[in-house]
Amino acid sequence: MARRSAQSEDNALDRLPKAPLTRESLAQTLALARYVRPYRARFFGGLTTLFISASLGLAFPLLAGSLIDAALHPAGATLPVLGAVSLDRIALLLVAAVTVQALASFNSALSFNRVGQRALADLRRDCYARLIALPMAFFGQRRVGELTSRVSTDVAQIEGALIDALPQMCRQVVFLIGGVTMIALTSGRLTAIMLGTLPVLIAAAVFFGRRLRRFSRETQDQLAATNTIVEETLQAIASVKAFANEAFELGRYERANARVLAAALSAARWRAVFVAFFIVALFGGIVIVLWFGAGLLRAGAITPGELTRFVLYTTFVAGAMGQSAELFSQIQKTVGATQRVRELLRETVEIAPDAPVAATDLPERLRGEVAFEGVSFHYPSRPEVAVLRDVSLVARPGERIALVGPSGAGKSTLTALLLRFYEPDGGRLSFDGREAKEYPLAWLRGQLAIVPQDVLLFGGTIAENIAYGRPGASDAAIRDAARLANADEFISAFPEGYGTLVGDRGIKLSGGQRQRVAIARAILKNPAVLILDEATSSLDSESERLVQVALDRLMKDRTSFIVAHRLATIRTADRIAVLEAGRIVEIGTHAELSALPAGLYRKLSELQFGQSEG
Ligand code: ATP
């Protein structure tokens, strides 16, 4: 399981688009360096030990070559600075170099990981903080699943770059520059031969690399398509089974799977050719170098130790160059990832209030007068559709107003404006005579509570779920709220009572029970204005009665807006506003509206209750 998810993360990383390296894109990437800044001492410490370890790595071929020369000369080999050194001393030097290198590598790996993980934790936190502070309009325009997976793959890519690619790159640069320098110092002629074979190798690597990448991208895309099928069907597994469409879905999967296979096999062919070519090129190069080297050795132009050194340095340089293509593509992906993360971090968070009432000027609590005056609205994602048109409605403190109307009339939208999820395009929304946007957003939302249609409980205990209405509430307060919400009885009947876990790891509450938990939550919050989105599905009559009693208690002395689907439950509302296509077409009590001969309310009730009650 863990392997699967690690693999799918790899696939996601493979599919990340790359960004061209421009001055601007690099500047953006560097802007994220501020996450490393708090840990810069450790970062530079890690960098220093990394250079120490890489330089000692470079000393290895030198010492190994000298070891061979020392074996052939009783006086030992000549080393720079140290002069003539005996075989045993060289061996000791090698052991010392390896030991120090190991310690330095340990330190640099640990430092880069520590800095990287800390910086990443900060970055993840900021991304999350920004994400939840974005306005609702943002979420309406993007698929949230896509957004979260994007952020997590992008952050994973940055993590890889910081912890692996960056140290790798520093190490390869040291090997490349140091290796070429040492080779040149060893033998100019051999260096010329080696460097001569390079362009061929590089051209071939680029050619094959492009082709291979195209096919593996194709494979990844096809694989993603098959995964989408799996996700879709598992999410809607009940529908798949109810329609007995298993064979249909399997067919869909098989076709997608065949495309994955075809793409993977093409990629495999190119990869095999590439491997074969690489072996020919790499070993061919070494053979040529060895051949010339052996000739030079016979002629006495170089020592056996120098030839060994040369071959070892050649592999270092070749390795560094082989990795550079991969590292370059890593950098491009990281630049792309940082751009997207930066975009998210730059999104504007919910509207800062234009002229917020000074905190001292805020009342303890709203009285609860709510006024819509000529409000019009369309959703930002669909500017061409007017959802509310010239809506005017004044609710007096403590009044119960029911919102009814056909599906899509704009009832829920009206409540979304109350919560200031969106701003009206025209007209004014005010609370206690002051325009809504004059209040600080969080304060205003603190005065409102919603009991939604579909109550989603968070994973955790029942007590925690109720306390969501007022984090930090005492156990006694939670219990009181539950009692008022008619929830205490069923909660206490569970063996673990208020400590019962709900959600995936715990029990599943029935619809009526969930609603009562939501009511308890709202009671605990003690809002001045209440929004009830009535559940469309009806409960059995006993649950219905328990919920209704709880709601009546909750609505007492609060201004309440009730989005009603079943008209039977709102007869006692003080006023009923009937919406149609974004306008309030009728408003009045049940009796008044029922008396209108050709009224929409009357028509709707007749539809719901049949002739007998109409
Ligand atoms: P119902 O009784 O079916 O819940 P409603 O009266 O509550 O309907 P709203 O949910 O307010 O209706 O929707 C009003 C209109 O706005 C509909 O045409 C709907 O398609 C559109 N709409 C709702 N939410 C959004 C959104 N987030 N983005 C774009 N359009 C939306």
Image (cartoon, rainbow, N blue to C red):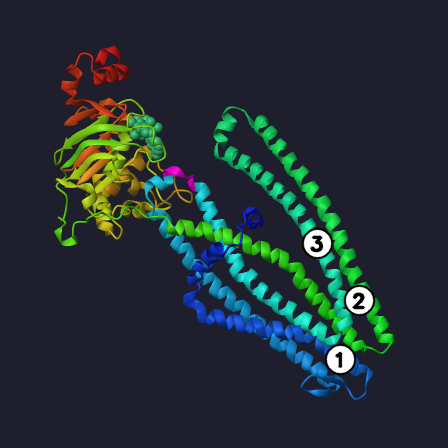
Q: Nearer the viewer, mark 1 or mark 2?
A: 2
Is label 2 within 8 A of ligand 1 (CB to nearest ligand atom)? no
Query: Regarding mark 1 in the picture, which secondary structure is present there?
Result: helix
Q: Which residues are magenta?
A: 140-144
Task: Give percent across and percent down for residue 568.
Answer: 23, 22
Residue 142 lies in the magenta stretch: yes
Query: Regarding mark 2 in the picture, which secondary structure is present there?
Result: helix
Residue 67: mark in rendering: 1
Residue 289: mark in rendering: 2
Q: Amino acid at mark 2?
A: Val
> Which is more N-terminal, label 2 or label 1?
1
Determine the quadrant in which ligand 1 lies: top left
Residue holding disc 3: 203
Q: Amino acid at mark 3?
A: Ala
Pointer 3: residues within 10 angstroms few (<14), some, or many (20+)?
few
Point 54% across, 36% down: residue: 230
Residue in front for this viewpoint, 583 or 288: 288
Distance, label 3 to label 2, CA atoms, is 20 Å
